[in-house]
Structures are given as structure tokens and as C-alpha cells.
């Protein structure tokens, strides 16, 4: 969704002024463009006419979660649940459980802010840790926006959790060092001060997701992870041992492009996750080396205007994604 999408929905509503689907679509574009209050006003007007339209309640939940109003998000999910099929209701119930845990855990959290970030943190987290996080995030802002040629439309929201809270609230697996979900960076605060380089990598990685989500919402997940790993490596170096992808290629053990596009890494076993991240990272680093940072930035800029992924790749990087993927495989 982008400015071009907003213009399309506005034109569609000129032709079909009462069409609820187009009105909700316009509200979603306002949300993704950073106009959260405008989007909520849109939804309030629609709800008066179509209270049984599930998509508007789901969108309201997204907006309220992004704004940190978890009680309002839960209320929107409760309105949506009776209006959807059983499979969708299960997903809503799971999300409601997660939001309920977050609301309970974060009820007494404190708030800190800087020009580009709003930080909420558990009361027993040391203020020095919060100051370090703020400093590293501002460094990440300067670095990532310069490298990508993109700036986020809204301030990034960060939640810092004390011992045990992060995994309880997010349900993240043990290998997950932080999480970007619902437009919020969620970070366990333990040991951040004593592991500054690791903290810089984690925060840079997750902030990159925020920039990409806001400016290139069409970007597939595997591109997200590759670009985020590129940025974290630039921020603080990367000492992680990389998989031998050339050997995996020769053994026909790599994930295909189709698999990369379809995978949800958090739902996969460990060896698949490692391949997913290693291939994403290797591909993006290869692109930067072969096409230059400017080429990657041009690709992202084109994608952010509403161009599809292949067309954006051809304009910014000189070939389709499949063509680039095949060339990367040969060069491993």
C-alpha cells in the first residue's frame, strides 16, 4: 500500500461512493502511510453503516495495536470474531491471547522518547539500559535511513521486557533475540549493557524491519530478512559462522525461490530457518556487491511507489527476481 494505492481507492470511490470494501481499503492506505488517526476516523464512519463488516474491525485492531492501545485492539477483535469463518476465528483467538498477555504485562510500564522512537519499558529495568537502547536506536536511524535511502513515516515504538517477560508475551522461540510484530519492536532487556555490539545488531535489524514495513509494505519476508541482516552487519560487524551455501547448492539442498517466498520462518524447524536466513543474507549481500547500494535503494524506492516486485527489480537492479536469483546461485 502506498500513495498510488490511496489514489486508486479514491478514484474507485468516486465511481462507487458507497462501496464498503473501497472505504476500508482507503482507511488501510491511510494507516500504512502513517495517518493512523485519519484511518480510525474513516473506520468510525464506516462502522455506523456496516458494523457487520469484519475487515473494518480487523483493521481497527491493527491500528490500535500499533498505537499501543491494546484494550481497544482486543475490543475490535471481539467484534470481528463472530463475523468470520472458524479458521479465521482461531487466528483471532490466538492473537487475543497474545494481546491480553501484553496488556497485563505492560500495564505498569514506563515511557521514554526521543525524536524518532517511543520506548516503553518494565519498571525494574535500569535507566542506563533505557538510555543505551535510545542511543543505539538513534545510531541505527542515521545508519539505516542513509543506507536504504528511506525514512519511516512514523516514530518507531519499542517495548523492553525484563527477565522472562519477552518469551512469555511473544511466545518466541529460544533462538529469537528480538521481534518486530504489529508495528512494534519487542526486545528483552537482559544483558544489553554488557553486550553492546550484540544489542546494536539486534536493534538495527529490527529497526530495519520498521523502515521497510512503513515504506515498502509489499516487500516479501525473505527480502526483509536479507536486508535487515545486511544492515546489522554494517552496524556492528557479524561474527556469526555462515553456512557453506555453495556446498548446499551442489548437493541440491538449498531452498528454492518458491520456497523462500512461501516460508514463514517462525513456523519451521531449525535447519530450515538457518537456510532461510543464510540464503536471504547471502543474496542481498551479493546484490549490494554486484549492483551497488544505490541499485538496492532504487529497487526499494520503486517498490514503495506501488510497483510490483519484479518490475521494481528490473528498474533498480536490471533483471527480474528470478533472473537475479539464478545469477546469485551461479556465483556462490
Image (cartoon, grey):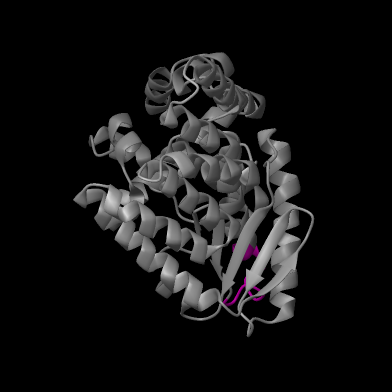
Which residue does the image show at 49% across and 14% down from the upper left? 15
Q: Where is residue 89 in the image (x, y as percent from the top left)?
A: 26, 54
Which residue does the image show at 45% across and 39% down from the upper left? 49
Q: Position of residue 82 (x, y in %)?
A: 28, 54
Question: In the current view of this chain or complex, which residue is farthest to the front?
Answer: 49
Residue 197 is covered by the magenta coloring: yes
The magenta segment is 190-199
Which residue does the image show at 54% across and 45% down from the upper left? 44
Question: In the current view of this chain or complex, which residue is farthest to the bottom?
Answer: 124
Rendered position, 122 above or below 90: below
Question: In the current view of this chain or complex, which residue is farthest to the left?
Answer: 86
Q: Quadrant where the C terminus lies? A: top left
Which residue does the image show at 51% across and 81% down from the upper left? 163
Q: Quadrant of residue 6?
A: top right
Camera-side residue of 124 and 72? 72
How many numbered marks have been drawn onto this rendered protein structure? Answer: 0
Rendered position, 124 above or below 196: below
Rendered position, 262 above or below 134: above
Residue 23 is covered by the magenta coloring: no
Q: Where is residue 139 in the image (x, y as percent from the top left)?
A: 75, 54
Rendered position, 199 above or below 313: below
Can residue 171 be seen at all in this image of the molecule?
Answer: no
Question: In the current view of this chain or complex, which residue is farthest to the right?
Answer: 115
Can residue 204 be seen at all in this image of the molecule?
Answer: yes
Camera-side residue of 103 and 15? 15
Q: Where is residue 229 in the image (x, y as percent from the top left)?
A: 53, 47
Assign the magenta stretch its main secondary structure: loop
Amino acid at each position: 500500500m502506498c500513495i498510488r494505492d490511496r489514489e486508486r481507492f479514491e478514484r474507485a470511490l468516486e465511481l462507487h461512493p458507497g462501496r464498503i470494501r473501497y472505504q476500508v481499503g482507503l482507511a488501510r492506505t491511510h494507516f500504512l502511510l502513517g495517518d493512523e488517526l485519519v484511518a480510525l476516523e474513516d473506520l468510525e464512519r464506516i462502522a455506523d453503516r456496516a458494523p457487520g463488516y469484519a475487515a473494518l474491525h480487523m483493521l481497527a485492531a491493527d491500528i490500535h495495536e500499533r498505537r499501543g492501545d491494546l484494550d481497544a485492539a482486543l475490543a475490535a477483535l471481539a467484534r470481528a470474531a463472530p463475523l468470520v469463518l472458524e479458521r479465521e476465528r482461531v487466528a483471532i483467538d490466538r492473537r487475543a491471547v497474545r494481546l491480553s498477555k501484553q496488556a497485563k504485562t505492560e500495564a505498569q510500564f514506563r515511557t521514554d522518547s526521543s525524536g524518532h522512537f517511543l520506548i516503553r519499558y518494565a519498571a525494574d529495568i535500569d535507566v542506563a539500559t533505557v538510555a543505551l537502547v535510545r542511543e543505539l536506536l538513534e545510531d541505527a536511524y542515521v545508519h539505516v535511513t542513509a543506507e536504504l535511502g528511506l525514512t519511516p513515516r512514523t516514530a518507531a515504538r519499542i517495548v523492553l521486557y525484563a527477565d522472562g517477560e519477552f518469551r512469555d508475551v511473544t511466545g518466541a522461540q529460544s533462538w529469537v533475540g528480538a521481534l518486530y510484530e504489529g508495528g512494534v519492536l519487542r526486545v528483552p532487556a537482559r544483558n544489553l549493557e554488557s553486550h553492546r555490539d550484540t544489542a546494536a545488531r539486534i536493534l538495527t535489524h529490527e529497526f530495519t524491519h520498521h523502515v521497510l514495513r512503513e515504506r515498502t509494505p509489499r516487500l516479501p519476508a525473505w527480502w526483509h530478512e536479507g536486508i535487515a541482516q545486511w544492515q546489522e552487519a554494517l552496524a556492528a560487524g557479524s561474527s556469526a559462522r555462515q553456512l557453506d551455501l555453495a556446498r548446499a547448492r551442489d548437493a541440491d539442498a538449498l531452498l528454492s525461490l518458491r520456497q523462500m517466498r512461501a516460508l514463514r520462518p517462525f513456523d519451521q524447524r531449525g535447519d530450515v530457518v538457518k537456510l532461510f536466513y543464510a540464503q536471504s543474507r547471502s543474496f542481498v549481500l551479493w546484490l549490494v556487491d554486484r549492483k551497488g547500494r544505490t541499485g538496492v535503494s532504487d529497487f526499494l524506492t520503486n517498490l514503495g511507489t506501488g510497483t510490483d516486485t519484479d518490475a521494481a527489480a528490473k528498474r533498480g537492479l536490471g533483471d527480474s527476481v528470478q533472473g537475479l536469483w539464478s545469477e546469485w546461485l551461479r556465483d556462490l
